[in-house]
């Protein structure tokens, strides 16, 4: 009996090897070759949001290529080196992309000695996920989500499809408005336009109890209402803002346009930390796999998740580039 | 307990046929050779397939709109759903392996020869049934892989001269794949194929009992070969092996979860379909017969392969069973095995 069992065990080893080599384990867990559009999350937890955390050495780098869509004002495509890590409860993403300029002064107020001018924009990176199934998203990604041909009627943009409750999750890292409070803006898209004439109104913020950025302006919109203790900073926390006192300013001084406070609630589900140095951005996102909120995608290890990525470079004519094809997040 | 059993036996007479079923002699060479466990393991795996299949059927929704999400629910939300589906997935692969090994053992041992020709033929039918289980089950999650592989598979059936269009229509339930295709595949997978499997296995076992296992290839001495009773001696070993298989399936389901790709998108013609691993060799073979030559791979080669398997015991009628004395049979084995392995390796590579 003993020899019989040994024979069977010995026979099973090469058989298992054959099945495994042929992909018997399938897409998720069976090994095999990864396509260029696959982001493979490794099971390891970084100790912090630092982009140089040692844990990232164990995560495979997938270079996501973005392109300039027709009609866009973006000047050049951007390649984003992307990594992912996960634990039993959390997931982290790390992005790194070249950007010659650090644009972290969105609509900042500049004082000319007598009046104010608002200018500038911020660099951004955003991810899109399905919350509910969206026709075509898993094979065409961002293209189907927002970028139907510009000549198409509005009904074909931003998933505007009456009678359907398609929803996409949007993780939006903004160099000023959210990065300052170490968060990404957790939003969603659906077909219900809050302003029927504005396709951008398909984008909505997740539920929040408090926090977020508010427009720092007077009632007539011609000047800031508040200022920070130190002139020149691109942003200031609501808790640190004081009433505008022009006597403390000279011509050329700047005052932030955004007054910030960390989001509390579903909109603040994503921790983020972005750093610009030496001509490149590094950005780390961190979120619970399952936030428990119905305005968020629930990520489950073992499952394949299609997603899209867009990069906004605020230098020059402000616009963004998008991932060429659908991207797939897989778990190692 | 004994009183209850006696009472039941008194009224049903179940004891005698049950004893007859379990108390038959197993030749010593089969008792000691692990390759003679393949058959019983196939039955054990089928039982697992049936059990896990029934459990999944409680949650599965056989419609293009609901199939993917119900499988997704089983795999990622339902408590232990991943285990049930994983065991189903891996036992399906194991079944293919074991049916092939069972046939190979029979082939190499010349056990298909008189008077066991029909036992062999039923074994070949069993291979087709198990492969059909795989083909029909592949579509049920309604994911990209299953959808497009089935589309290609039914196209191949459609390329058969004369009857192709009817065959494809029968499989799909129309010209295009949709709810009727899924319903038909589900019906075949859940009802027709299990019924066919059980019928063939029962016939196979009945013939095996009637004609007994083939004697040892080499028998030394004049004394008749020793045997052990199936119950309890041989069954105990089979039970231990079956237990090992169960453990292996659970480990496999845990280490390598059953795959579920992206949901099927019939408009995505860019998807490159690939069959499950046991059809890879055929998938590769088809590539060598493009265009007008397609019928060679879709009709002639399968017809020749399965035809020669069915006819084998009626062609090879010599009494010699030792493989080293049957160079043509051994050579054919090496040729086919090398061919299948090479094609599989190329397709997987």
Image: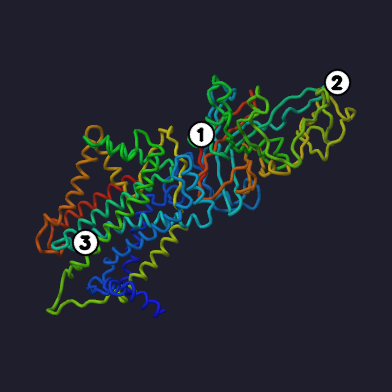
Name the side, left or right, on which B285 lies relative to A262: left
Q: Earlier in the sequence, mark 2 or mark 1?
A: 2
Is residue B53 shown above or below A63?
below
Using the rendered image, report if marks 2 and 1 lie on a common chain: yes
Name the side, left or right, on which B88 lies relative to A104: left
Q: Provide residue A162's location: percent of width, then percent of height.
A: 58, 29
* Colouring of the image: rainbow
**Label 2 chain ID:** A
Using the rendered image, report if marks 1 and 3 lie on a common chain: no
Q: What residue is shown at x 35% (from left), y 59% (from top)? A: B46
**Label 3 chain ID:** B
Name the side, left or right, on which A202 lies relative to B8: right
Mark 2 to mark 3: distance in Å?
Answer: 99 Å
Give the crowd class for mark 3: few <14, some 14-19, many >=20 residues within 10 Å: some
Which image quarter: residue B184? top left
Element class at badge 2: loop
Residue picked out by circle 3: B106
Residue picked out by circle 2: A114
- Disc 2 and disc 3 in contact, CB within 8 angstroms: no
In front: B294, or A48? Answer: B294
Q: Provide residue A115's location: percent of width, then percent of height.
A: 83, 21
Residue A135: mark: 1
Q: Provide residue B143's location: percent of width, then percent of height.
A: 44, 42
Which image quarter: residue B237? bottom left
């Amino acid at each position: 009996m003993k020899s019989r069992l040994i024979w069977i065990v010995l026979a099973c080893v090469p058989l298992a090897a054959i099945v495994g080599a042929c992909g018997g384990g399938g897409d998720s867990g069976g090994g095999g070759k990864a396509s260029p559009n696959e982001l493979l999350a490794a099971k390891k937890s970084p100790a912090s949001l630092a982009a140089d955390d040692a844990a990232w050495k164990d995560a495979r780098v997938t270079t996501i290529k973005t392109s300039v869509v027709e009609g866009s004002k973006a000047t050049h495509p951007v390649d984003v080196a992307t990594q992912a890590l996960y634990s039993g409860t959390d997931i982290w993403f790390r992005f790194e992309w070249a950007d010659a300029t650090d644009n972290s002064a969105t609509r900042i107020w500049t004082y000319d000695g007598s009046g104010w001018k608002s200018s500038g924009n911020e660099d951004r990176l955003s991810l899109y996920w399905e919350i509910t199934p969206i026709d075509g998203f898993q094979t065409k990604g961002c293209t189907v989500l927002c970028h139907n041909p510009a000549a198409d009627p509005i009904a074909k943009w931003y998933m505007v499809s009456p009678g359907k409750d398609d929803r996409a999750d949007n993780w939006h890292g903004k160099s000023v408005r959210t990065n300052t409070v170490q968060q990404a803006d957790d939003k969603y898209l659906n077909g219900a336009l809050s302003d029927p004439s504005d396709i951008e109104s398909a984008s909505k913020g997740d539920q929040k109890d408090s926090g977020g950025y508010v427009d720092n302006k007077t009632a007539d919109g011609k000047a800031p209402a508040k200022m920070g203790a130190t002139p020149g900073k691109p942003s200031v926390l609501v808790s640190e803002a004081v009433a505008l006192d022009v006597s403390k300013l000279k011509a050329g001084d700047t005052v932030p346009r955004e007054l910030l406070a960390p989001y509390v609630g579903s909109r603040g589900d994503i921790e983020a930390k972005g750093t610009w140095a030496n001509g490149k951005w590094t950005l780390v996102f961190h979120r619970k796999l399952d936030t428990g909120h119905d305005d968020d995608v629930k990520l489950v290890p073992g499952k394949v998740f299609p997603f899209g990525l867009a990069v906004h470079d605020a230098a020059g004519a402000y616009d963004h580039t998008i991932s060429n094809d659908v991207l797939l997040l897989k778990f190692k | 307990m004994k009183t209850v059993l006696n009472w039941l036996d008194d009224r049903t007479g179940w004891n005698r046929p049950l004893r007859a079923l379990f108390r038959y002699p197993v030749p010593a060479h089969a008792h000691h050779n692990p390759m003679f466990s393949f058959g019983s393991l196939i039955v054990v795996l089928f039982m697992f397939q049936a059990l896990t299949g029934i459990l999944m059927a409680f949650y599965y929704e056989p419609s293009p709109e609901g199939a993917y999400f119900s499988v997704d629910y089983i795999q990622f939300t339902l408590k232990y759903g991943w285990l049930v589906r994983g065991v189903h997935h891996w036992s399906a692969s194991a079944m293919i392996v074991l049916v092939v090994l069972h046939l190979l053992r029979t082939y190499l041992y010349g056990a298909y020869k008189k008077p066991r020709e029909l036992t062999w033929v039923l074994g070949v039918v069993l291979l087709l049934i198990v492969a059909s289980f795989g083909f029909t089950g592949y579509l049920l999650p309604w994911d990209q892989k299953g959808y497009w592989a089935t589309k290609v598979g039914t196209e191949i059936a459609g390329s058969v001269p004369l009857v192709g269009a009817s065959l494809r229509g029968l499989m799909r339930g129309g010209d295009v794949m949709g709810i009727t295709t899924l319903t038909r595949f589900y019906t075949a997978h859940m009802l027709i194929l299990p019924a066919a499997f059980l019928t063939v296995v029962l016939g196979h076992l009945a013939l095996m009992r009637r004609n007994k296992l083939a004697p040892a290839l080499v028998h030394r001495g004049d004394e008749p070969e020793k045997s052990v009773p199936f119950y309890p001696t041989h069954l105990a070993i089979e039970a231990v092996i079956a237990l090992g298989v169960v453990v292996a399936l659970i480990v496999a389901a845990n280490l390598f979860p059953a795959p579920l790709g992206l949901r099927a998108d019939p408009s995505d013609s860019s998807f490159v379909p690939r069959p499950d691993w046991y059809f890879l060799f055929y998938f590769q073979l088809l590539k060598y017969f493009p265009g007008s030559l397609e019928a060679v791979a879709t009709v002639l080669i399968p017809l020749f392969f399965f035809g020669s398997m069915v006819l084998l015991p009626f062609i090879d009628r010599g009494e010699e069973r030792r493989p080293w004395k049957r160079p043509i049979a051994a050579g054919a084995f090496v040729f086919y095995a090398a061919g299948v392995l090479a094609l599989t390796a190329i397709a997987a590579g």
